[in-house]
Image: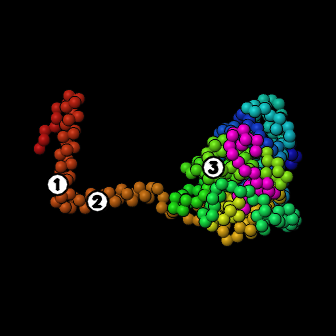
Amino acid sequence: MSPHFRRRRQQADTGPGTTGPARVDARTKNLTKRLRPGEIAVIDHEDLDRVSAEALVACRPAAVLNAARSTSGRYPNLGPGILVEAGIPLVDDLGSAVMAVKEGQVLTVDGDEVRAGDVLVAEGTAQDADTVEAAQAQAREGLSVQLEAFATNTMDYVRKERDLLLDGVGVPVVRTRFEGRHVLIVVRGYHYKEDLAMLRPYIREYRPLLIGVDGGADALIEAGHSPDMIVGDMDSVSDKALRSGAEIVIHAYRDGRAPGQRRVEDLGVEHVVFPATGTSEDIAMLLADDSGAELIVAVGTHDTLIEFLDKGRSGMASTFLTRLRVGSKLIDAKGVSQLYRTRISSWQLVLLAVVGLLALFVALAATNVGQTIFGLSGAWFDDLVNFFRSLVGIAPEPTT
């Protein structure tokens, strides 16, 4: 079957297409801040990761258009499957032409084609459960290559950051006191909202220092907490969080360049700079460990091979080695909300309450005191009814 005929048959199966205004951004995490239900997300995101896909699903777009390949074959990333499972149309490999779409322009997604009115904007590959599974299977076969790249990257990172990892050379002096304290580090990763909710009793009892890694600071604020420190390159944290009074530690490149520094300076917020090769969540752990934290609890951080690969090769080795450096101090609370879920549903609790009330009434009715109470309640109710009847001009019922 020719690709043209297959595409036309798919269009016939899916109806006249999906239409909506476009929201365009090459950075998915920036796009999800302004994407609204029913709009069409236009992104340029090769190897769409799980966190980005879940953020897109939460926005409930009409469709997702990707200029790049959502699965390149480098590793079996989870993002495309999450979108397809949620019933959101995903069209891949549309090329740079789709990124030229104007913000708010009305697009129609019809199978593999994207149109603006009658004009064909771009043509890609519509994904479904079968194509996603096939891409995943092919990507799993290439994992051995990624493992070799991981090993190479690890050695490169050790050579660059040996002094930082072994002796803490380069860790900045901060005003926040860590000695003997528990520290909770929050990253906007997998299940971070549910895990934060489960940790509420721990936070209330132990009062740990709260560190938000970029958008993790906003996650803490949304959960009703005040961050003590914000660590990151400041590209996905709100002005509200930066002005919250938390100490700001800007993650810079090893040569000292810090793209987020200008933004913080414009807000007039005091800050310190931490130059390091690793990721922001890694330097948050290193800072807490080197400053004397007794225990480090991590929420939403990365700890599996697929998650390392989701971060890209440059971020894999730093996280792996940082976790080895922190060692027994680190407790990974990511996924704690999945550990136990009550088997009692809400309607069962309501039914239990109703049964309890009925049992109470029956028990009272069997006693002299209960009968007296019911008699007085009945008389009071009759008086109340007669009062309202008199208000509307109806003669009161005769009392017996």
The image's mark for residue 372 is: 1
Measure how far apart labels 2 and 3 are at the Cα level: 52 Å
Q: Amino acid at mark 1?
A: Thr
Residue at left 83%, top 66%?
162
Label 2, secondary structure: give it: helix
Is residue 349 shown left or right of residue 296?
left
Task: Please report whichever mark, 2 or 3, sits nearer to the chain's N-terminal start.
Answer: 3
| Image x and y of residue 23, in percent | 73, 37
The image's mark for residue 246 is: 3
Q: Which residue is mark 2?
A: 360
Density class for disc 2 (Cα within 10 Å; few <14, some 14-19, many ≥20) is: few
The reply to whether discs 2 and 1 touch (Cβ–Cβ < 8 Å) is: no
Residue at left 19%, top 61%?
367
| Image x and y of residue 101, in percent | 80, 34
Residue at left 72%, top 33%?
21
105 or 246: nearer the viewer = 246
Measure how far apart labels 1 and 3 are at the Cα level: 62 Å
Residue at left 69%, top 64%?
289
| Image x and y of residue 240, in percent | 63, 42
354 or 42: nearer the viewer = 42
Is residue 178 visible in the rendered image? The answer is yes
Is residue 246 shown left or right of residue 74?
left
Density class for disc 1 (Cα within 10 Å; few <14, some 14-19, many ≥20) is: few
Asked if residue 363 lies in the magenta stretch, the reply is no
Look at the picture and state if 166 lies above or below 198.
below
Q: Amino acid at mark 3?
A: Ala
Task: Please report whichever mark, 2 or 1, sits nearer to the chain's N-terminal start.
Answer: 2
The image's mark for residue 315 is: none
Look at the picture and state if 2 lies above or below 75.
above
Measure how far apart labels 2 and 1 are at the Cα level: 15 Å
Colour mode of the rendering: rainbow
Q: Amino acid at mark 2?
A: Leu
